[in-house]
Amino acid sequence: MSAKNFGFSIHKDRQIDYDKNYREFYYRVKAVEPSISLCISCGNCTATCSAGNFTSMNLRNVILLAARGEVNNLGDNVSACLLCGKCQLGCPRGVNTRNVVIAIRKELKIRRKP
Amino acid sequence: MNFDPFIIPFSVGATFLFVWLFGKLFGWIYTLPKRDQKKLQRHVFSFRILRTFGEIVRECLLHFRLFRINALLGYMHASLAAGWFLLIIFGTVESKVQSGKAFNMPYDPIFYRFFNHAPAHTIQLQTLSFLMDTFLLLVLSAVVFAWFKRLRSKWFGMRRTTRQSRVDRVALTALWLVFPLRFLAESATGAIYGNGDFFTGILGRASESDAVFRMIEYPAWWAYSISLCGFFVLLPFSRYMHIPAEIILVTFRRAGIGHLRRFSAFADIEVESCSRCGVCIDTCQLQKDVDIREVLPVYFLRSIRERDTNEKGASKCLVCGKCAQACPVRIDVNNQRIVQREEFNSNKNFQPLHFEKAQYSGGGKIGYYAGCMTHLTPSIKLAMVKILLAAEADFVFLDQEGSLCCGRPMLLAGEFNGAAAIAMRNEKLIKDCGIETLITSCPICLKMFSEEYQLNIPVLHHSQYIEQILEENKITLNLNRSSYTYHDPCELGRGLGIYDAPRSILTKAGKLIEPDLVRKHAPCCGGSIGSVNLTHAEKKAVTTIAIGKYVETHADILVVSCPLCKKTFVGPNKIKVMDIAEIVADRCEK
């Protein structure tokens, strides 16, 4: 059934369903790099990001999505990371961002494997 | 033919050792890439091998580098190694001269005194006998020093020493027993037959009757043989493998063979060459400041050798390279570390994006590449632009609109594939700009450009460039009364050997006060991207202690030449932190 065009559209449902989401992912990453839980989503990391300068890489978003367990769209984002470590210097909370990215990359790979 | 059952343990041990070592050597050469095998072949059959022999004598026998660290430590190792070597050589000569035959049993020199009771009658034999006693005395003095080192390691220039594993301790005990037992056995025989020289004859001359010696002589020779056997059998599995491995390492290194981007035969030889002397322990800031012992090269290399997973040891390290510069065997610990990180990396085939949007601006002879970190410390890049304008250079700011990473952080994290891809992309971007000289403010980028890129143009650190234009009088500095102290960044100093350029600039700009630890001994700022998972608190502890040393100099300004060091050091300190480019930009006059 095709949707009728009313000349406007509504956003897709953005309800965050913790029952369906893969929240274990976040805890697995946290086990490797505990400092991920210090993140306050301030976005300093994203502002400094070298990769974000040329791509849509957004570490704030990555951590947020990971925390919600919405891991399906993380792949492209984290694979842009160059591990340059600028975000780590910008972070006011002392999150070890480089290792967060490394841990997420490893976890995603493990998940894709089975 | 001389024979007695007690030669059996020695012969068994020695045969086992030789078979094992040749098997090992064959395995190493076999697993070398073809290119390296050819290099080795060319080296061994050329006159350059003589220089390799020279280094083997200097380092494996006389231990020059250890003498430079501490005279007592050097003496202990040199007298044991060289003394034992000379005992073997002169013992062989002595037994051959005595028997008058060119070929005799290999164990003859080892148990010479037991089989030959006649006192030395010719001048040659007397000289040899005297020399043998001298060498035995030399080796025994080393053993006494080794015992003493267990009690007072500080006298040997080491605050902390290695905690040895069980195999090492047993092998060590066997080694410590070999020479006292040899002395006892030779003395006993000497006392009975009156053929001991000045040293092995001491016991015989001291006592009237030889009844005791008759009782202990035979057991002593047995014990001597058994301790030798024990040492030989344990050698391949203990730290003493460094004795043969170091000789091979020196030869391989001189042949131009180096690390590969995986755990290669060369890396294995390096691991086996580690004698666990513990000289690296005192240099490590992570051990000193935050008490992380796993990263110490002695334990880290041991865990590689025992195929033990030591992920913490591989990933926490700052890769500052202080341990590597202290190592008397010159083991490339940094490369060992990143190769291990690659081994632990479960994401080996990771490919980063291509970054189509990235573009650098061209149109100038000199290209200034700020690098990621410098973009985070904008005062440095502004200062550099000011200096370049003042020098009226035909320059272009390559990455004004933001730079792609050089790839070194990925390399250090053990993502070799990703690093290579990024490096290739960045290399192409730089080449497309058509510049003739590349200047960068970031030592991390500089190290990558000069070692991994094929840019075919001169690549300079900004301190080198500033030194150059100061010498050419393109800019001059107005001297003022500020006093400076300088921090050597790891990648610039130990990594690339650039120590003098920043110092020569600072002496022109004001007064330079050096802290206690300078040049290759300089501390790491603690912010190194070399570490994968050192926590913020641990880094902070390293930084605080490192900057404390600079505050002690009471200089007005702590000068750094690395944006990452600057970013790490700035904060509520008692000393102002500035980059060398900022100092020059403040004072430069056309």
Image (cartoon, rainbow, N blue to C red):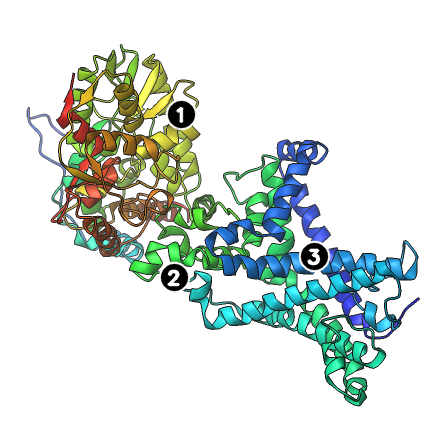
Give me the disc on residue B293: 2
Q: How far, Cα to Cα, is label 1 from label 2? A: 37 Å
Q: Earlier in the sequence, mark 3 or mark 1?
A: 3
* Quarter of the figure that contains the C terminus of chain B: top left
The amino acid beneath tag 3 is Phe
The kind of secondary structure element at disc 3 is helix
Q: Residue at x 53, y 45 (%)?
A: B263
Q: Chain of mark 1?
A: B
The one nearer the camera, A103 or B152, is B152
Whether labels 3 and 1 belong to a single chain: the reply is yes
Image x and y of residue B242, in percent = 60, 55
Q: How far, Cα to Cα, is label 3 from label 1? A: 51 Å
Q: Nearer the viewer, mark 3 or mark 1?
A: 3
The amino acid beneath tag 2 is Arg
Extreme residue toward the left, this view:
A7
Q: Which residue was labeled with disc 3?
A: B85
